[in-house]
Image (cartoon, grey):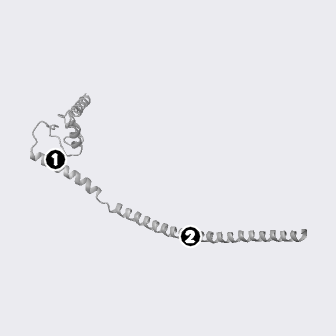
Amino acid sequence: MRRLLLLAAAVGVVSVWGLTPGLADAGLTGGSFIDVPKSHPAYSAVQNLLSRGILVPTSSGQFMGDQPLLRYDAAVWLDRAIKNIEAKISATTDLTPRLATLENQVRSLSSDLNRLSADLSTLSARVNALQQAVGQGGEVAQKAQLGVVLGLTGVILGLAALAWLIFF
């Protein structure tokens, strides 16, 4: 019986605790304010600031959005926001390893470019040599053709002269 009574009390406490989200996290980030309805235009902004720890619910779990903003409260909120931003910046500002990696990649690309430039120079020299060889080979071919034509012409003229002698 006593056990059943304790169980009922525990369920009651958990139910009340769960029904009041602002109290459920006891002012910790990640909960929600009990006085900010989900239909309010600022609800998502308030939730975002709450989740980042910039806004903290009162002890009663309220945001009290209809109350005037005091300069003290604004200073506390701005301080939390700046610390939040600084923490994120300091976590990502150590770019030394990334810069070292980029420098190595640039050096590698530079050496590849130098090697390719040397290869290109070699290929250019080979192409020039081939062009000269083809140019010289063209002259040789022309001389050979001229020699064949002259030789055939000589043979034909010789045969014609021989035929002239024989038949006339």
Q: Residue at x 84, y 71 (%)?
A: 161
The quarter holding residue 55 reads top left
Asked if residue 54 is positioned above or below residue 67 in the image, the reply reads: below
The quarter holding residue 92 reads bottom left
Q: Residue at x 16, y 51 (%)?
A: 79
Residue 80 image point, x, y percent: 18, 49
- Viewer-proximal residue, 136 or 64? 136
Residue 136 image point, x, y percent: 63, 72
Asked if residue 1 is positioned above or below residue 155 in the image, the reply reads: above
Number of labels in the image equals: 2
The N terminus: image quadrant:
top left
- Viewer-proximal residue, 143 or 45? 143
Residue 77: assigned label: 1
- Local SS, label 2: helix
95 horizontally vs 123: left or right: left
**Structural crowding at the residue carrying mark 1, measured as other residues with C-alpha within 10 Å and reported as few (<14), some (14–19) or many (≥20):** some
